[in-house]
Amino acid sequence: MELQNNLHTEDGWQIIERAFDPEQLVTTGSNFMLGNGYLGYRGTFAEWEAEQYVACIVTDTWDTAADSTWRELCNVPNGLFTRALVAGEPLSAFTGETRDYERRLDLRTGLSTRCATWSGAAGKSITLKVEKFASYDEVQLVVMRYHLEAHADTELILLTGIDGQVWSLNGEHFRVYEPAVEGALLRLSTRTVEFDTQIEVVEGLRLTGKAPVRTTIRQEERRILRELRFRMRAGDAITLEKVVAITHSNQCDAPRAEALALVTRGVAAGFEALYAAHRAHWDAIWAVSDIEIGGNLEAQVLARFNLYHNIIATPTHDKLPIGARGLSCQVYQGAAFWDQEIFNLPMFLYTQPEVARQILEYRHVTLPGARKKARDLGYYGAFYAWTSGKTGEELFPDYFFTDVLTGRPIHNHFNSWQIHISPDIVYAVWQYYEATGDWDFIVQAGAEIAFEVAQFLVSHVYFKKDKNRYEFIRLLGPDEYHENVDNNAYTNYMAHYALERALLIFERLAEENPAALEVLLARLGLDASVTAAWQDIVELLYLPQPDPETGVIEQCDGFFKLEDVTPAELRKRLIHPEEYWGWPNGIAVEAQVLKQADVLQLLAQIPRWPVEILRANYDYYEPRTEHGSSLSPSVHALIATKAGLYDEAYRYFMEAATIDLYNMSKKVMSGGSFLGGIHTAAAGGVWIMIVQGMAGFAVTETGVRFAPALPAQWEALRFSVRVRGHALAVEITAEALTVRAGEENPGALPVTVGEETVAVAAGETATFRSDGGVK
Amino acid sequence: MELQNNLHTEDGWQIIERAFDPEQLVTTGSNFMLGNGYLGYRGTFAEWEAEQYVACIVTDTWDTAADSTWRELCNVPNGLFTRALVAGEPLSAFTGETRDYERRLDLRTGLSTRCATWSGAAGKSITLKVEKFASYDEVQLVVMRYHLEAHADTELILLTGIDGQVWSLNGEHFRVYEPAVEGALLRLSTRTVEFDTQIEVVEGLRLTGKAPVRTTIRQEERRILRELRFRMRAGDAITLEKVVAITHSNQCDAPRAEALALVTRGVAAGFEALYAAHRAHWDAIWAVSDIEIGGNLEAQVLARFNLYHNIIATPTHDKLPIGARGLSCQVYQGAAFWDQEIFNLPMFLYTQPEVARQILEYRHVTLPGARKKARDLGYYGAFYAWTSGKTGEELFPDYFFTDVLTGRPIHNHFNSWQIHISPDIVYAVWQYYEATGDWDFIVQAGAEIAFEVAQFLVSHVYFKKDKNRYEFIRLLGPDEYHENVDNNAYTNYMAHYALERALLIFERLAEENPAALEVLLARLGLDASVTAAWQDIVELLYLPQPDPETGVIEQCDGFFKLEDVTPAELRKRLIHPEEYWGWPNGIAVEAQVLKQADVLQLLAQIPRWPVEILRANYDYYEPRTEHGSSLSPSVHALIATKAGLYDEAYRYFMEAATIDLYNMSKKVMSGGSFLGGIHTAAAGGVWIMIVQGMAGFAVTETGVRFAPALPAQWEALRFSVRVRGHALAVEITAEALTVRAGEENPGALPVTVGEETVAVAAGETATFRSDGGVK
């Protein structure tokens, strides 16, 4: 079927492009990208170079260029570079004539394919098929099969090797380039500026079909290529299999040897064997994480597209962050924000809990960075970085935006005032524990995170003696247009939640793991009296309540006193289209206009209010929200669903799901900063909208609950979840919700729909009416 | 002698201009102005109109124009308007030929005189002498004597009456103009837009020398004039005495009748009698408040010029504010800032304590406005207005400056974050009590002020439980370039001082005036337990201490971490010369560059640190201060004197003393706002610099102390002070300090210089060596 934005799908797994649009080069590079959590390889053509934004972004290669203050991931030399010269003319999508063009990304297998028949000025026609994948079996490998068939006699030259002339968002990251021939392989070695990280790109080749008449090595300062000359006759075909390894010294001790060995083995195995091994991993992933949507092919492919991007953005090989733009580009420094725990994590929590644990362990290993940040800002405990890379030290700069009207840098306070990141992580820790029952994780890591965050909150909070309550002062909540606010409802509630959980954990450790508790407290320099302060704050923290008249929770102190103007009206006040709307003097600062859902985010995470309150707050805040963040629409869809506003919910579902694929991102530029790439939080939000929204899935004290609200646009919804060792396959139709318990499940799990609860034993199936009763 | 800026003086009492400079019209209008605390009459010529900024600003006429958000004092119709037409040609400083021009302001008597001989195109020469004063005897009166002598036969027409075509800084304040003839008098009545205040300007005339050949009344919508035609022969002279009353319904019940009666009586009395009565008031003022400087005529006239402006800015007829620009113009709304208590008040405190009491009583009658402001901002008690008019309600707008780079208004927080205004007032109350021993004032007014301010501070302060201390958060200190700071040293110390005094007052009232205390507490809705909170804050408030290494007190949390750059370097970053330097994005916001002395202000007001600390802080902050406020130089002079930096002190003395007279004001425009007029705080600062600085005068527990540091540029310094009913005449030379006690003094007063203390009895004289010993 035809999708929007020049795209098609066939079976809900394929993203297909049948016409090449040079205008969309930046976007399609993200949308057709490959990745495996170790590297992201942009959806670019083999013959392209820096000018076309070819990029292979590799995690854990953080570096600050000499002329920059930005630490970001490296775009490494491109080992897949391959250019064909047909009768001396470069095969190119920009010149000559292209017929039968098709590019597709198979989300099912992570394989990208490009086919085309091309003829240049000399009229020599040639057919091209290029397939490539970023291996999930060996994450350091990218593999390409480049197939050419000549339709006329012609000279053909293939230039193929490693192109180190890559671009970078913020400065030059490589201070050394060393191209070399290693037996049958090519190598390009670099070293980074800041940490002297050794990065190795090794390429190996397997050529079939026809032998070259001559092979030459061309070695330049920043690239090394083979030049293969062929005399093609009409009907001749050649196939080049390229195996490329990218290794670096932050991830292995001998990156060169490892890369050489990987490529040697890979070339020996060949494309098909490597692909089969890779594909087995995707089989396993989709077996647990797929969402099937019946009766709506567009929604189906959109859902999978977003799940795919949430998956490939997530490192599974090590404790590393999920980038706010995944590994799609260098924007946001390949670093984690609160997006990771609140948007990316839920899918993993309930479908791949072992990955979820690792994501949270990343927050444990980065505690030293969070402690340092707390100390640097005059606090103690753990104040997690707003932008967190390898070490957890703060990567977010004091000056991110530029005032486009004056050219002066803007000092925002995302890094220093947006404290909710810390309790958000405790929230995620506890969500993980509730989903898995994995107390071992709490003992090993979760307790330390929770205690250190609790201590940070103690060091931050103020007490108003005359009001006998604690307050959090000078905050920045999820709505980033309003800095320097007090008692941001979201932040206060999350802090309260985190302190409650820290107390719970402390008490249970004291009972069940007293030795571990003692060791932990000693390491943190704390003693048992520390909980008195936590308890005091839990009891006396100011938690803004819904207004008794309207039911609306005030986003922060004084919010209702700001100018009440619609986002559309406000927008007219822009002097320059790329102005930043927020601090210190943007158009939204003094207005009740939100960048993104703030109170709605609270309602999504703390499910303690009835539907009328959800509705009242949705009705109040939705028209005032500008959705300047890609995090905003999915929360709106979730709350709209829970509030019974199904049309609204579906509109926001489509908005969130199409941000990248349909290139709907509102602000590619803001305050002079480029904000492109894949919006991984929106991708993660698609799982949340469907499973926690439309299926109403939630974990209860003893089991799970569903509150299905299948969109009218769909016929059926199928997905799996795993809760505390139980696997459940769920199918929802307009009439029924069916739960099938996994064969291996450890006993029966109580499943609630509406007022009905059924304990579903291993291998059994329970069917409920969609409106709640048992069928 | 010749002064700077086209000015001269003769005996240290006269400001003399011998050439008219049309370029300086705005400045000379302020410098030659007349006033009496009820009205300010700009130093303009009788024939001038709105275009030349003629203005008579009357206190207690606050009004907001229909098209403005600014409440400001009215510029009332000009009753002195008089234009001569000589042979049909208007006598004008801008046309024709002027000889023997001289304008002088006699500071001794508040009389302004202009002499000139003028001839127009027709060559008819005429000599003019105009004298005028704003009566201190009847403050509603301004009186002018207009004398003309013809040197050739000529027709002469005098147009004289009331000109209502006045300008206004922010909109039209009069919704009605009613010109009328009342017997022999002219009247122009108006009513204001906002409060319907009735303003009456009545003019009466006495003509001598020659009778007019014809008299006509010319009545227009906004003015009423007499046209007097004369046939002058060479040597003929006429003298016009104009008596003008300005009354309004905020200050009397029947303003029209009162104005008519005043003018009728005034015309009958005549210029000389009115002037004699007026002058007697100036005699009395200078008898107590003059400062004589021997051996330096420039310093002498500068001192008196500033004392004069501090005096005429100060209402003595009612409990009304001293405007930050006095009554010299409409800038700053004719309203009081902290300037009033900290800069204007000291001269009155120690030379005219009855005026000082009235100034402070103004803060008592405006408590309702301060309470309202506190409530509006979520506090209780009394949060005094940053800009305080009649009622004490906040006049300072949320948007004062404009971003000259974008045209957008700037939301500063002078009104909401600059809380030190409230404890500053308690500080002044206590200074008054210490200076006078006037416990009755405390019982009648001071206690209520102190208690309400203490309650405000309770409602504002936060407690950090983990640090066991109180903190003040989100402040703006005297250095207004740094908004949103915590624990501003000046503010914290002043709050501490105020709370201590509130406790002292409470305790003494409980002991000596328990009934009054009970009544007061009942009225405030408080009970005796209220002091527990005050005591707690006094004990646990964080008071930033001098750094043990450097001795420097940090201006606010984190100040030392800001960029350390000189004001001169910083200035180079300006894109536009009129940019506002401060919040939110001005060039000084992230730099250690001060608008004005902040910690130095603290050191000036709280004398608890030794000279090394004064020196260390002066050395640190002085080079970092931009003196963007006229309040800054005088504090620098004071602290430099106390720190023994005499050259520095004298440099700053001259800077503060010449701001207006030499037109040295740094920023006539800032952030798009006009900031001209007389800088009355700088004027008040001159008394402080001399008496509290160079003479080192201070009140001690039982008497007074002097620490003379006579500038090398001076031979002698003479002034008087009154302390607790004791009058002291002081003379300081390089060798000696002599104190003569008043004949009426109530017993002996201990006077300390250095280590020596002498109890000086009524009528006695004590002489000390200037370096401390008794002579």
Image (spheres, coloured by chain):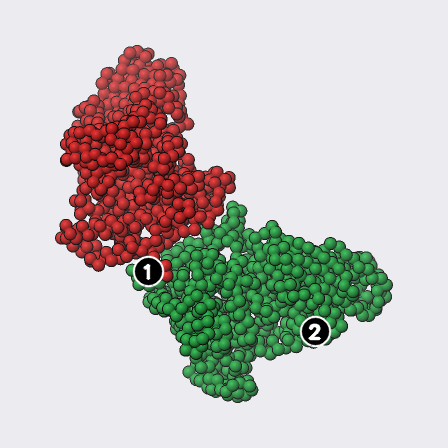
Chain colours: A red, B green
Quadrant in which residue A523 is drawn: bottom left
Which kind of residue does numbered mark 2 sit on? Tyr
Spot occupied by residue A509 in the image (x, y as percentages of width and height) = 17, 51
Residues B362 and A199: in front is B362
Identify the element where label 1 is drawn: strand
Spot occupied by residue B455 in the image (x, y as percentages of width and height) = 42, 65
**The C terminus of chain A lies in quadrant:** top left
Q: Which residue is mark 2?
A: B275
State if disc 1 and disc 2 touch (CB < 8 Å): no
The vertical placement of B494 against A538, above or below, is below
Please report, as a chain letter, where disc 1 is located. B
Quadrant in which residue A646 is drawn: top left
Question: Image point 42% across, 47% down: which residue?
Answer: A549
Q: Answer with left or right where residue A359 lies relative to residue B250.
A: left
Which kind of residue does numbered mark 1 sit on? Lys
Residues A89 and A77: in front is A77
Spot occupied by residue A265 in the image (x, y as percentages of width and height) = 17, 28
In primary-sequence order, the first of circles 2 and 1 is 2
Please report, as a chain letter, where disc 2 is located. B
Q: State the count of labels.
A: 2
Q: Which residue is mark 1?
A: B464
Residue A45 visible in image:
no
Question: Image point 37% across, 68% down: which residue?
Answer: B529
Identify the element where label 2 is drawn: helix
The vertical placement of A418 against B550, above or below, is above
